[in-house]
Image (spheres, grey):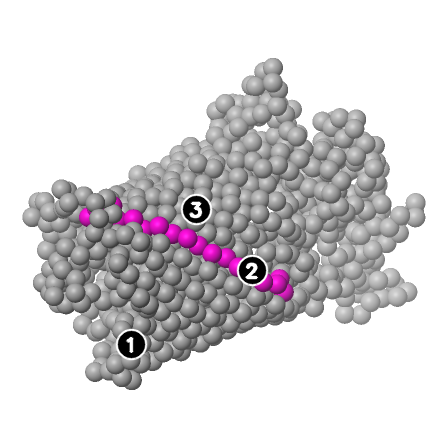
């Protein structure tokens, strides 16, 4: 039997273990005081399968309630979670256009989203995409800030995000919400949800449906200048060194202002064309009127003045429509057996849009011929009717504005859980469940061109007697072919030409997950300090992935990124146990001391076996003061994506260090490295800002291994009612990390640093031109993350109402990774704490603060989000400045990114009719996104910064 003090202490410490937890437990506290004689229900806390009578545990857990989501108008749960203090890095969001796919993920501790395990009611979903998780389904979110491989197996390295659903909802709830931005009114989002719940004598049933429609926003829709221009510090400017020094000292100064230190460096594939021929400068169409060009229309191409500004026509917010449905039910067969089921169905259509196809015959299919010197080329025939030069064009680049370029996803997912749970004996519990998940995707690319037809269309052509332009020669015309005019400027490629050469590309794939899990646990023996509790369980998990790519991509017969299909499967059988040992109780300085222990054995079909463990300490010093700690090993097996992701092309932003533009900056030894790889003296003619690379899975990967440690205190003093404080130190260390070497790092390391292993990633042709750079995943060295978390919650009554304050602060002490060191030209362990590296932000400090005030039916809320400043040392094209020990101002420059703080205010009022009206203004001070020169989506961190200025939402909710 539990007395009032025991119940009060459990609730008081529960209130302080996470943001928002006081909201979810305030009603529990009242009911406990009113019914103290009733037995406290055993509950399961994320991080353990053993049920217990309180929420405090050795592992730090942050709780976010459904009330927190509603008052702030949150529909994109993943985006909201990524803004929380414990998250770091820059995972893909729906604001990720180039490289995104409409999904949303989160990243604990900046260790990569693949090292954060996402669960729904303690079980793995078929996808960790938060777009498949409807906000209306959520009761609370428990964030375990600790490695949990011993409990949940692989992937629980940085921690766990566990979505707990509304299994006990009763009644009818309808919600409609509209949101937008004041300055970017294209950013419209409409949300409608309906939840129905009914309790029966022996069971419960909940049904819900969510629909969200997000409109598209282009970068050009924003008034933020740098979003409308591809501004970078140019190494080719006449004032390059002065511009770099100014940028280091002052940050961004636009080129249209006095002292401008950046240049608009667009794409060399322009609407007016860029044409390469032997023995003359590159040419472009100066008239560019959409007609048939003559030789007098052409002039020398001027770089970067003639480059194409692709920025405004890229999406800043990708559009999507998603429909999520869920059904959960339970039926008590008797006092010891309850059957339950969970069904989730989701469908999402989404779209990304880039600037029109940058058709480039260096990479893309075209006419293949032989030059007079006997060398081959891929470009436009000298006998093509539209070719004004009268000689073979060895490389043709043109922005195909007539066709556009977009990528559309149609994803469907299904998850079904069936299980039984209950109690037997003296408080023993069991759970047996089967979990089946299936996720299917289809991808259609528009705007790409078909190689076999391009070869004919770019080849010889002539005007026949009827005035028609015919492919081939008069002696050998090609029936059905339409000759292509890439020389005339926008409009010269007619619809007939597009119809002949265009090729919508379709790819598809599916992923299947099956798990069978069982666990039984309870009190084994009563020791002097309390009951010895233990449990044992098993799990069998099977995963299978299939990918099919368009035949044109598979054969490399189309423009854009080519790809190869891969399929694979694996299974793992696991046995795990948990033990909780009470050591002391009811002693001075030791109200209770318990040692939780977890051990897990996994037998992987592909990787062999592994044993992980975790040891913990729960030391209740006095009422309200808990000292806690965990230490354990973590293990991450390569995912299906790591192993079997289809290989494909990518075009990362980087330049060839061996190009003519960079040749003069190389030492004689570095020039020798280039020449050893077929680059001619003076450099390659490749001055492109993007290079072709190959990405994809690697079936030879091996698992990551490491350990994690947490040490902390949780304190809820009796003399300040409603106050809860937690302070935790955490450390995660990994070895054999799965990652990929970036294309720029391979190029610099090979040719500037002479690292032979990196030269293996670069392929050049006989002329020394880059044809491919490998960016496939591989096992690298190590990764570490260490820091401190602090949380404070305070609930008190004032002004006739109730206040709830929460402060959550996460401070990085260390975030090391193996990265390329531009000074030593080697890959070394480097502390990324406070840096922007490889398109990821690792802020030293993130702080969340919320203040809620409730007066009868009125609720007012204020929230602040702080992200500390960043630094980076590598500019997109300029590169890094070598270290100069004698004069640091002349080298080793670190470029600064300012810190930022966002402010949100919301209000809601509930009427006696069950109607609630909510409204809010987010980013109240209208903060603009921050310019980061090497960032690849809009020159900013689109995952962490708010892109649309001051915004608003209005929400209508009706309950019956």
Is residue 666 inside the magenta stretch? Answer: no
The kind of secondary structure element at disc 3 is strand
Residue 228 in view in this figure: no
The kind of secondary structure element at disc 2 is strand
**Residue at 8%, 45% in the rendered image:** 799
Range covered by the magenta-colored residues: 606-623
Residue 751: x and y, percent?
Answer: 74, 35
Residue placed most toward the observer, 215 or 51 = 51
> Would you say 368 lies left or right of 526 here?
right
Disc 3 crowd, CA 10 A, few/some/many (<14, 14-19, 20+): many
Residue 110: x and y, percent?
Answer: 47, 46
Residue placed most toward the observer, 432 or 244 = 432
Residue 801 in view in this figure: yes
Residue at which label 2 appears: 610
Residue at which label 1 appears: 425
Which quadrant would the N terminus be assigned to in this image? bottom left
Is residue 956 shown above or below 730? below
Disc 2 crowd, CA 10 A, few/some/many (<14, 14-19, 20+): some
Kindly give the residue lying farthest to the right in the view shown.
Answer: 373
**Residue at 36%, 65% in the rendered image:** 534
Total marks in image = 3
Disc 1 crowd, CA 10 A, few/some/many (<14, 14-19, 20+): few
What is the C-alpha distance between the residues marked 2 and 1? 33 Å
Say whether disc 3 or disc 2 marks the residue closer to the N-terminus: 2
> Would you say 600 lies left or right of 457 here?
left
Residue at which label 3 appears: 709
Is residue 581 shown above or below 172? above
Residue 195: x and y, percent?
Answer: 28, 71
């Amino acid at each position: 039997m539990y007395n009032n003090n025991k119940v009060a202490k459990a609730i008081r410490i529960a209130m302080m273990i996470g943001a928002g937890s006081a909201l979810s437990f305030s009603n529990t506290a009242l009911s406990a005081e009113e019914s103290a004689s009733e037995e406290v229900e055993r509950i399961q806390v994320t991080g353990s399968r053993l049920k217990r009578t309180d929420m405090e545990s050795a592992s730090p857990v942050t709780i976010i309630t459904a009330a927190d989501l509603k008052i702030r108008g949150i529909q994109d749960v993943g985006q909201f979670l990524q803004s929380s203090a414990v998250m770091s890095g820059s995972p893909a969001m729906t604001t990720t256009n180039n490289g995104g796919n409409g999904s949303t993920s989160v990243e604990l501790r900046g260790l990569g989203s693949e090292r954060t395990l996402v669960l729904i009611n303690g079980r793995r979903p078929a996808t960790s995409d938060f777009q498949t998780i409807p906000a209306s389904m959520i009761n609370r979110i428990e964030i375990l800030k600790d490695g949990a491989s011993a409990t949940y197996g692989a992937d629980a390295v940085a921690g766990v995000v566990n979505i707990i659903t509304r299994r006990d909802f009763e009644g009818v709830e309808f919600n409609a919400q509209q949101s937008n931005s004041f300055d970017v009114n294209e950013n419209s989002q409409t949300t409608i949800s309906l939840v129905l719940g009914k309790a029966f004598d022996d069971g419960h049933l909940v049904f819900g449906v969510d629909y969200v429609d997000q409109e598209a926003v282009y970068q050009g829709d924003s008034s933020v200048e740098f979003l409308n221009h591809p501004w970078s510090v140019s190494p080719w400017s006449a004032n390059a060194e002065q511009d770099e020094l100014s940028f280091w000292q002052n940050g961004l100064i636009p080129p249209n202002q006095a002292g401008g230190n950046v240049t608009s460096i667009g794409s060399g594939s322009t609407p007016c064309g860029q044409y390469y021929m032997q023995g003359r400068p590159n040419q472009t169409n100066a008239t560019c009127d959409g007609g048939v060009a003559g030789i007098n229309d052409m002039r020398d191409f001027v770089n970067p003045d003639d480059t194409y500004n692709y920025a405004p026509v890229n999406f800043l917010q990708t559009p999507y429509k998603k429909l999520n449905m869920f059904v959960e039910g339970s039926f008590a067969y008797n006092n010891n057996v309850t059957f339950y089921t969970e069904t989730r169905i989701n469908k999402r259509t989404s779209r990304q849009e880039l600037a029109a196809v940058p058709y480039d015959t260096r990479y893309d299919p075209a006419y293949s011929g032989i030059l007079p010197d006997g060398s081959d080329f891929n470009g436009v025939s000298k006998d093509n009717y539209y070719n004004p030069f009268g000689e073979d064009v060895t490389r043709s680049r043109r922005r195909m504005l007539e066709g556009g370029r977009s990528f559309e996803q149609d994803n469907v997912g299904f998850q079904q859980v069936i299980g039984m749970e209950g109690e037997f004996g003296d408080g023993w519990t069991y759970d047996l469940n089967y979990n089946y998940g299936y996720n299917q995707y289809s991808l259609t690319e528009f705007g790409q061109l078909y190689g076999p037809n391009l070869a004919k269309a770019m080849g010889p052509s002539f005007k026949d007697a009827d005035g028609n332009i015919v492919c081939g020669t008069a002696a050998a015309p090609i029936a059905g072919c339409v000759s292509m005019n890439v020389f005339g400027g926008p409009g010269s490629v007619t619809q007939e030409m597009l119809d002949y050469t265009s090729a919508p590309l379709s790819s598809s794939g599916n992923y299947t997950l099956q798990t069978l899990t069982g666990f039984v646990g309870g009190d084994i023996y009563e020791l002097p300090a309390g009951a010895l509790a233990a449990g044992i369980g098993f799990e069998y998990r099977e995963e299978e992935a299939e990918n099919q790519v368009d035949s044109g991509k598979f054969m490399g017969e189309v423009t854009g990124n080519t790809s190869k299909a891969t399929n694979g499967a694996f299974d793992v059988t696991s046995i795990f146990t948990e033990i909780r040992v009470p050591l002391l109780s009811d002693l001075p300085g030791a109200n209770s001391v318990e040692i939780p222990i977890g051990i897990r054995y996994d037998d992987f079909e592909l990787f062999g076996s592994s044993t992980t463990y975790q040891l913990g300490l729960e030391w209740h010093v006095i009422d309200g003061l808990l000292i806690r700690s965990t230490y354990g090993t973590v293990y991450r097996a390569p995912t299906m994506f790591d192993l079997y992701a289809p290989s494909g092309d990518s075009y990362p932003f980087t330049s060839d260090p061996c190009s003519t533009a960079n040749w003069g900056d190389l030492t004689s030894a570095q020039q020798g490295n280039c020449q050893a790889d077929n680059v001619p003296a003076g450099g390659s003619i490749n001055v492109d800002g993007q290079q072709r690379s190959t990405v994809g899975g690697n079936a030879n990967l091996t698992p990551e291994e490491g350990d994690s440690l947490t040490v902390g205190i949780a304190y809820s003093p009796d003399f300040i009612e409603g106050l809860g404080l937690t302070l935790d130190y955490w450390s995660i260390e990994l070895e054999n990390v799965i990652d990929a070497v970036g294309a720029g790092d391979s190029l610099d390391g090979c040719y500037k640093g002479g690292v032979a292993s990196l030269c293996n990633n670069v392929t050049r042709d006989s002329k020394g031109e880059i044809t491919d750079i490998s960016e496939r995943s591989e096992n690298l060295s190590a990764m570490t993350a260490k820091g401190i978390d602090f949380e404070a919650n305070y609930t008190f009554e004032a002004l006739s109402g109730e206040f709830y304050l929460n402060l959550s602060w996460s401070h990085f002490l260390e975030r090391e990774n193996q990265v390329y060191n531009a000074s030593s030209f080697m890959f070394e362990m480097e502390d990324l704490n406070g840096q922007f590296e490889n398109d990821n932000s690792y802020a030293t400090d993130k702080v969340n603060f919320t203040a809620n005030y409730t007066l009868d039916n009125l609720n007012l809320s204020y929230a602040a989000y702080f992200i500390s400043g960043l630094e980076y040392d590598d500019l997109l094209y300029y590169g890094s400045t070598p270290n100069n020990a004698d004069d640091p101002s002349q080298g080793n420059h670190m470029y600064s990114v300012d810190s930022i703080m966002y402010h949100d205010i919301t209000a809601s009022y509930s009427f006696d009719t069950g109607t609630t009206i909510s409204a809010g203004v987010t980013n109240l001070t209208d903060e603009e996104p921050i310019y980061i020169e090497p960032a690849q989506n809009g020159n900013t961190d689109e995952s962490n910064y708010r892109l649309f200025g001051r915004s608003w939402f209005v929400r209508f909710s009706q309950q019956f």
